[in-house]
Amino acid sequence: MSAPKRKADNELPRPNKQSVKESSTARRKQLSNFIDSFGNKMPKACSNCRRLGLECKVHVKSGEEWSRLVSERARLLGEVKKALEAQRAVERARQEAADRELAVREELRKVEAEAEDAIAVEEA
C-alpha cells in the first residue's frame, strides 16, 4: 500500500458538498424567496417595506419584526377591550341616570297632582 498524499501547507482542504456552508447572502435570498412564496401579506407595511415601496410579507419564523407586531397587536387588543369596558360602564351609568330621572319626574308629577288637589279643596 502507498501512503496517503500529503497536502501542501498552503492548500486549503476541500470540504465535501454536504459540509459546505452557504454564504449569508445565499441564506438571506433563500429566506426572502421562502417568505415571498409562503409569507402572509401584512395589512400595513413595515418601515423598511414602506421606505422601499415593497409589498410587506412576513412569515411566523422571520424574527424580530414579527415578534414586535404580535406583541403590539396583543397590546392594542387589550386597549380595545379596556375602551369597550369603559364604554359599557358609561352606558350603564347613563341608563341608571335616565331611569333615576324618570322616577324623579314621576314623583314630581304625583306631588304636583297632589298640590293641584290641595289648591282645589282650599278654593272650594
Image (cartoon, grey):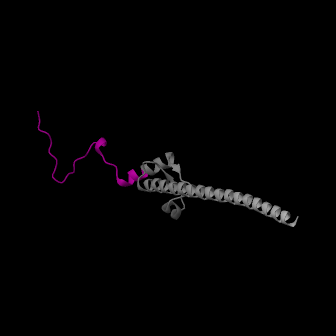
Q: Residue at x 87, y 66 (%)?
A: 123
Residue 1 lies in what quarter of the image? top left
Q: How many marks?
A: 0
**Quadrant of the image for the C terminus?**
bottom right
> Which is more toward the observer, 21 or 82?
82
Q: Residue at x 52, y 57 (%)?
A: 79
Judged left or right of residue 86, residue 106 is right
Residues in magenta? 1-29
Judged left or right of residue 31, residue 81 is right
Judged left or right of residue 52, residue 94 is right
> Which is more toward the observer, 51 or 102?
102
Q: Residue furthest right?
A: 124
Q: Position of residue 118 (x, y in %)?
A: 81, 63
Q: Main secondary structure of the magenta part?
A: loop
The answer to whether residue 124 is magenta is no
Residue 15 lies in what quarter of the image? top left
- Asked if 50 appears above or below 22 in the picture, the reply is below
> Which is more toward the observer, 61 or 78?
78
Q: Position of residue 41 (x, y in %)?
A: 54, 51
The answer to whether residue 6 is magenta is yes
Q: Residue furthest top?
A: 1
Q: Position of residue 101 (x, y in %)?
A: 69, 60
Q: Position of residue 29 (x, y in %)?
A: 43, 52
